[in-house]
């Protein structure tokens, strides 16, 4: 582990504190229902092992919000556009937004 000077440590702490203050400011704009969902998600995240990669984070958030959101959103395997799961077309390589993209296959 690298040794940090007191000045560097102080700067890091101040930066983290600033980020927390900024996050709390953004959270004030959310409804209480969304704030509870995010708080529950953060609490659960603190109690489990870290994810192997950040790529799983958005899926975890989507799963955490599924009871609050009207419907789960999925991405087209061809173009990446997001659409409600019930409107997606199943095909080889994933879900697609249109018959043409299903015919063309995953990108």
Image (cartoon, rainbow, N blue to C red):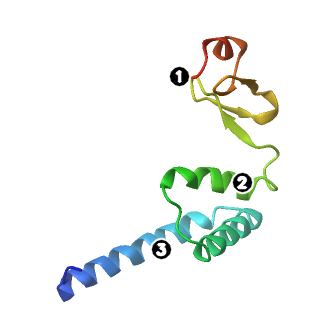
Of discs 1 and 3, which sits in the foreground?
1
Find residue 65 and report its horizontal and vertical position in percent: 73, 56
Q: Which image quarter: residue 81?
A: top right
Tell me the residue that label 2 is attached to.
63
Q: Earlier in the sequence, mark 1 or mark 3?
A: 3
Q: CA distance from mark 1 to mark 3?
A: 41 Å
Q: Is 63 above or below relative to 48?
A: above
**Residue at the spot 50% in from the left edge and 59% down from the top edge:** 52
- Report whether 91 appears left or right of 52: right
Instruction: Residue lying at the far bottom in this picture: please name it.
Output: 6
Q: Is 56 above or below relative to 88?
A: below
- Report whether 20 appears left or right of 98: left
Q: CA distance from mark 3 to mark 2?
A: 27 Å
Secondary structure state at the residue bearing disc 3 = helix
- Within-10-Å neighbours for mark 3: few <14, some 14–19, many 20+: few
**Residue at the spot 72% in from the left edge and 62% down from the top edge:** 34
Q: Which image quarter: residue 71?
A: top right
Find residue 3 and report its horizontal and vertical position in percent: 18, 84
Residue 107 tag number? 1
Looking at the picture, tell me which residue is in the foreground, 92 or 98.
Answer: 92
Q: Is 17 above or below relative to 29?
A: below
Q: Earlier in the sequence, mark 3 or mark 2?
A: 3
Find residue 107 and report its horizontal and vertical position in percent: 53, 22
Secondary structure state at the residue bearing disc 2 = helix
Q: CA distance from mark 2 to mark 1?
A: 25 Å
Q: Earlier in the sequence, mark 2 or mark 1?
A: 2
């Amino acid at each position: 582990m690298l040794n940090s000077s007191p000045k560097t440590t102080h700067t890091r702490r101040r930066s983290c504190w600033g980020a927390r203050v900024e996050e709390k400011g953004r959270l004030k704009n959310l409804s209480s229902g969304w704030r509870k969902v995010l708080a529950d998600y953060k609490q659960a995240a603190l109690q489990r092992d870290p994810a192997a990669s950040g790529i799983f984070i958005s899926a975890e958030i989507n799963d955490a919000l599924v009871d609050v959101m009207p419907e789960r959103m999925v991405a087209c395997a061809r173009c990446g556009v997001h659409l409600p799961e019930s409107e997606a077309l199943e095909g080889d390589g994933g879900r697609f937004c249109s018959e043409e993209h299903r015919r063309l296959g995953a990108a």
